[in-house]
Amino acid sequence: MNFSDDIERSIEKLHISTKAETDGRILEDAYAALEGIPKESSGQRDKNIWQTLFANKIVQYTAVAALIIVGFAMFFKSLAPEPTVSMRVDSALKKAGNICISKFHADGTEPYEQVWFSQTLKVQLVRTTDNNQVRFALTDIPNKVRMLNYSSSDSVRRESVDEKVLAELEKSMVQNSGLVSFLNSSEFTEDVHWQRVIDPTAMAQVPGTKIYDITLLQEAAPGEAKYRKWRILADTVTHLPKRAEWYAKSELGREYELERYSVFSYPDEKEIELLVQNTFGPADRRPDAPGYIGTPGRN
Amino acid sequence: MLEDERLISELHSGNRDALRQIYTKYKDGLLTIAASLLHDAVAAEDVLHDVFVTFAGSAGKIKLKVNLRNYLVASVANRVRDIYRKKKHPTVGLEQAGQISCDSSNPVQTAIFGEQFRLLTDALFQLPFEQRETIILHLKGGMKFREIAKMQGISTSTVQGRYRYGLEKLRKILNGERKK
C-alpha cells in the first residue's frame, strides 16, 4: 500500500505505547499530586440544594446549632494525633517479623555491616567486615547465649547473657537496628517533620516506594554548621522501609552529598535460621555456655 | 463520554483508581500526539508526565467545558507550544519512543510499519508547526476544526486552510521520498 496516497488514514493509525516504567513513574507522581489537593466537599457539589434549604428560617437555626455541635466534635477529633510517617513505618517494622539491614558507605558496593533480626526466632545476627576479617555475632535469646565467630578462626566464643539484658534486647530488637532512632531522632524539634518528596530518579531506582526527607541544621563543632538530610524510601503499600540514606553538606548553597545508606529486606524465618545454623551450628548445640539453664520447650 | 463524567466525578473526591483509568485510557493517544508534534520521544514523555501530574493536582478544581479527551489533548498541545516558545528542547529521534505498534504480529509488517512511521513523522516535522499541530490535533486528537480554531484563537477557515496546505505539503514530501 502506498501510504502517501492515504496520508490521513496513515496519521490516524500512528500509535506509540508508553513503557511500563514510564506508566509507573507518571502514575506515582500523579497520585502524589492528587493526594496533595483538597478534596471537594459535598457542600460545594450540592450548593444549589443548600441555597434552597437556607431560605427557610427554621432550617437556618437548626443548621447553626448543628454546625456548633459538629465544630466541637471536629475540635476534639483533631486532638487525636494523625499517624505520622514515623508512626506508620514504626508500626510496619514491628509487624515485619524478620528484617535484614545491609549498611553501605556512600561509594561502597559491599555492605560494611549486615544485621538480621528475627522477632519470631528471637535472634539477632550481626556480620561485620574489618580489615578483610569477617566477624559474626549472634545473640540467641531463647538459648540465653551470645556467640562470636571470626572468619580467621574456626573456634566459636560463647558467653552467657544476663536475663535482664536479654529482656531489654528482646524489647528493643527493632530499635537496635538504628532505624527507629533514625525515624524519631531527639534532634527533631516540633517543627521538623518528614516531608514527602517527588524524585523520579530515586523512584525509578527503588520502584514502588514513597520518599520522605527530613532536613536539619546541626552544629558539627562550635561555630561550624552542618546541614543534614535524611531520606527514607518506604513501600507504598506496606510502609516498610526499603532504603534509608544519610546526606550532609557544609554550606547552604552546595548540593547534599551522600554519606552512607542502608538497604532493607524482609527474609523468611527459615533463611535466617539457615544462616545462623551455617555459622554457629544447630540451635540444640548452642546452649552450652556457662549459666545455661535450658532451651524453653525442648527439655 | 458518560464514563468520563463518572471518572471525573470520582476524581473530585480523590479516587486514585479513577485517575488510573483516565491515564490508561488516554496515555498512548496523548503520547503519540506529543511525539508527533515534538519529534522527540523523551520530551514527549515529559509532556505526558507534566500534563497528568498537573491534571491530578488540579482535579478538585476542574470544571470541564469540553469533553475530557479534548481537555487533555489541548493540555498536551499547550505544553508543546510552551516548549517551542522556550526553544529549549533538543530533538531526539523517535526511535527511542516506547513502542511503535501496528496491529500485526507479523515481523515483516511490523518492520514496514516502523519504516512508514519514521517517514511519516519525519515528513510531519518538516511542516510549519501550525500546520503540523492542526493536522495532528484533527486526525490524532479527534478535534473538530472549530474546536481547534477556538483553542488557537483563530477562525475556522484559517484552520481548514492550514490543514489543507499541510496535507498537500506532506504528500509532496512523501512522494519525493518515494522517488528517491
Image: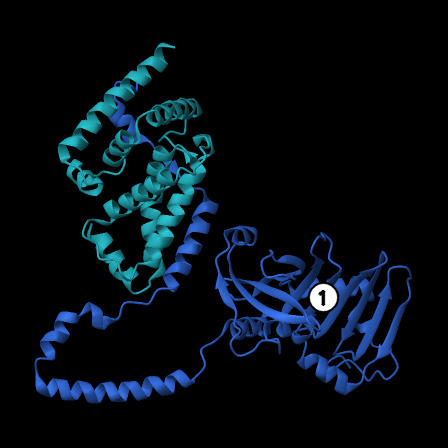
Chain colours: A blue, B cyan
Q: Quadrant of residue A266?
A: bottom right
Please name the residue shown 44% across and 35% down the image: B97
The C terminus of chain B sits in image quarter:
top left
Q: Residues within 10 Å of mark 1 (few under 14, many from 20)?
A: many
Compared with residue A158, is residue B125 higher up or lower down, i.e. above or below? above
**Up-down relation of residue A143 to residue A197 (above or below):** below
* Of the pair B85 and A80, the residue shown nearer to us: B85
In-front residue for pair B140/B152? B152
Image quadrant of residue A132? Answer: bottom right
A156 with respect to A32 (left or right): right
Q: Position of residue B35 (x, y in %)?
A: 38, 35
Q: Position of residue A235 (x, y in %)?
A: 53, 62
At label 1, the amino acid type is: Val
Residue identifier under label 1: A115
Q: Considering the numbered disc 1 on the image, is that residue within a helix, a strand or a loop? A: strand
Q: Is residue B118 left or right of residue A104?
A: left
